[in-house]
């Protein structure tokens, strides 16, 4: 076995069944309700519980490509790409044995995208807003029979199969919807069902006796059971993995810096370590509706004063990734190298440029703001402290305010009114494509129509009619090369507005437990593929 083996193939291939696969996590899930989740690790994991219409396989070029999951085939476009039809597989059942129907898929999309039609007083959910934006409305989801779902769009959307692969299409039986408590006990259509869930402590999955292996091209479901220890400190997560008390770190973002240094220095230990490019970018967002940051020159001053080298050091230095200058990472179609805010050859900041921008903003002595960061994500927290120290060099006093991962987007950082009320102008953030395409990376963080009252991902509240138009043009463009040029243009325009500062193209240093089998990296989720991991015999 060699270092980084899971980035280039499958480690410990096996068809052995049985045993309990053990995950561990520093915090809790954001939500197991497919309408309310926006963390990559939850999207990866939730596939063990539910089946969206479409999943992912690997194409001949090595890139991920859509494959049928709950649907029997990929979507059938008509009306120039304005209508997409999916037919469900026969024989798929929920955990109670009742058949999954087209109406269950329709209800799932409706409750996620048009919750006001289902729940009195609820106007937004925590998941992505693509369906709400592109469907003609609640009436845009048709079910002509029990096995057929038809989506009618306002405009053509060339990559609609990507949307059909989102957790949004995981079926939800209306009779069992206990919202808001559904997040604790979603009904399974996948290979496992929830046996026990103690929020913040433990999750245990048992087999769904009605799942049929032959009908599922995405999941192997070889373990008999799956457990997740929750609320464990970062150093303790590392200790459990190395001691054989856990198999996989659920978050998938890598070990602590001190553990990383020790592992990389030990030739024997390195054999259980992977160091892939994840497709994530670590960045922070500057909210243009908070205090002095309403001025673009104040936002540009923050960009120039950023010590990206120190922020990367908080994650462990060069093994943790490359210094970033663009929103799109090199792994996503549409990436073009450019650097709107150079921070010097050593990446520690251009303080003279920052001071010039402060003068243009009428703030030559600097200003005060606050930075939101997740304290349970120790590396992110330390990066926020490094950002604060870097900004202080030009008189920008930025207090780092602690939050936890669980409610970060649904209750605090992803709630624009909360940021304004508490004077939080900067939000620490990490982002990867919702699906493997430039649109899947850019739309939710740069489209004005994606701004939500809660569960918001456009954390800078970027609102540009030009960017919105570029996104719309790209969405209906079927030619791949032309699409990629449009995504590059969105990237440049968004950087010009200075509401996001990318500082690292992420590589993770992750450990796979010695018992784990069928371990491979997922380019879609930027971590191990949780649908295929099992245990060695």
Image (cartoon, grey):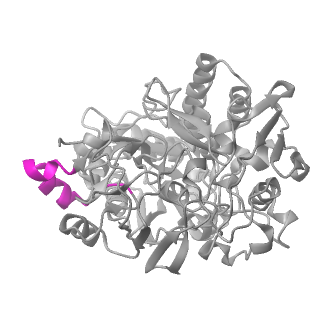
Which segment did they paint magenta?
252-272
Question: Where's the C terminus, which quadrant?
Answer: bottom left
Q: Is residue 523 above or below residue 401?
A: above
Depth check: 496 or 271 in front?
271
Q: Is residue 454 above or below residue 267?
A: below
* Point 28% across, 46% down: residue: 320
Magenta stretch: residue 258 in it?
yes
Residue 32 relative to residue 153: left or right: left
Identify the image quadrant of residue 11: top left
Q: Is residue 496 visible?
A: no
Residue 82 relative to residue 469: left or right: right
Residue that appears at 59% across and 60% down? 211
Residue 296 shows in the view: yes
Across and down, in percent, residue 227 comes to 41, 71
Q: Position of residue 350 (x, y in %)?
A: 34, 38
On the image, the x and y values in percent for residue 204 come to 46, 75
């Amino acid at each position: 076995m060699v270092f980084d083996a899971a980035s280039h193939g499958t480690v410990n291939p096996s068809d052995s069944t049985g045993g309990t696969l053990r995950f561990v996590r520093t915090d809790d899930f954001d939500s197991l309700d497919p309408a309310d989740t926006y963390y990559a690790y939850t999207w990866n994991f939730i596939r063990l519980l539910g089946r969206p219409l479409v999943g992912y396989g690997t194409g001949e070029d090595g890139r991920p490509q859509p494959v049928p999951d709950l649907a029997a085939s990929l979507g059938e476009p008509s009306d120039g790409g304005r209508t997409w039809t999916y037919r469900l597989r026969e024989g798929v059942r929920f955990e109670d044995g009742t058949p999954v129907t087209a109406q269950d898929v329709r209800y799932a999309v409706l409750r996620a995208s048009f919750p006001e039609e289902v729940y009195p007083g609820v106007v937004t959910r925590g998941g992505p807003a693509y369906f709400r934006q592109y469907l003609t409305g609640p009436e845009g989801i048709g079910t002509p029979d029990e096995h057929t779902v038809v989506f009618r769009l306002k405009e053509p959307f060339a990559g609609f199969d990507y949307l059909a692969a989102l957790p949004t299409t995981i079926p939800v039986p209306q009779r069992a919807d206990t919202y808001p408590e559904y997040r604790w006990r979603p009904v399974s259509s996948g290979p496992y069902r929830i046996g026990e869930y103690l929020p913040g402590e433990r999750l245990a999955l048992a087999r769904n006796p009605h799942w049929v292996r032959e009908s599922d091209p995405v999941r192997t479901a070889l373990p008999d059971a799956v457990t997740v220890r929750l609320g464990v400190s970062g150093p303790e997560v590392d200790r459990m993995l190395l001691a054989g008390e856990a198999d996989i770190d659920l978050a998938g973002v890598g070990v602590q810096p001190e553990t990383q240094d020790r592992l990389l220095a030990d030739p024997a230990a390195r054999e259980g370590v992977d160091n892939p490019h994840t497709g994530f970018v670590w960045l922070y967002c500057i909210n243009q509706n908070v205090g002095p940051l309403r001025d673009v020159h104040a936002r540009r001053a923050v960009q120039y004063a950023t010590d990206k080298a120190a922020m990367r050091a908080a994650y462990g230095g060069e093994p943790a990734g490359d210094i970033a200058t663009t929103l799109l990472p090199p792994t996503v179609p549409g990436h073009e190298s450019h650097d709107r805010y150079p921070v010097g050859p050593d990446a520690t900041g251009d303080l003279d440029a920052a001071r010039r921008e402060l003068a243009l903003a009428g703030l030559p002595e600097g200003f005060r703001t606050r930075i939101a960061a997740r304290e349970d994500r120790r590396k992110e927290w330390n990066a926020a402290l490094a950002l604060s120290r870097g900004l202080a060099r030009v008189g920008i006093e930025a207090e780092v305010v602690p939050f936890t991962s669980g409610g970060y987007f649904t209750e605090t950082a992803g709630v624009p009114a909360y940021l304004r009320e508490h004077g939080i102008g900067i939000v620490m953030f990490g982002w990867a494509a919702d699906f493997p395409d430039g649109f899947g990376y850019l739309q939710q963080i740069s489209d004005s129509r994606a701004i939500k009252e809660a569960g918001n991902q456009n954390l800078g509240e970027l609102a540009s009619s030009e960017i919105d138009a570029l996104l719309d043009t790209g969405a209906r463009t079927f030619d791949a090369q032309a699409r990629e040029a449009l995504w590059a243009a969105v990237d440049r325009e968004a950087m010009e507005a200075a509401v996001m500062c990318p500082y690292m193209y992420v590589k993770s240093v992750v450990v796979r437990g010695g018992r784990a089998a069928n371990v491979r990296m997922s380019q879609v989720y930027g971590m191990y593929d949780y649908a295929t991991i099992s245990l060695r015999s």
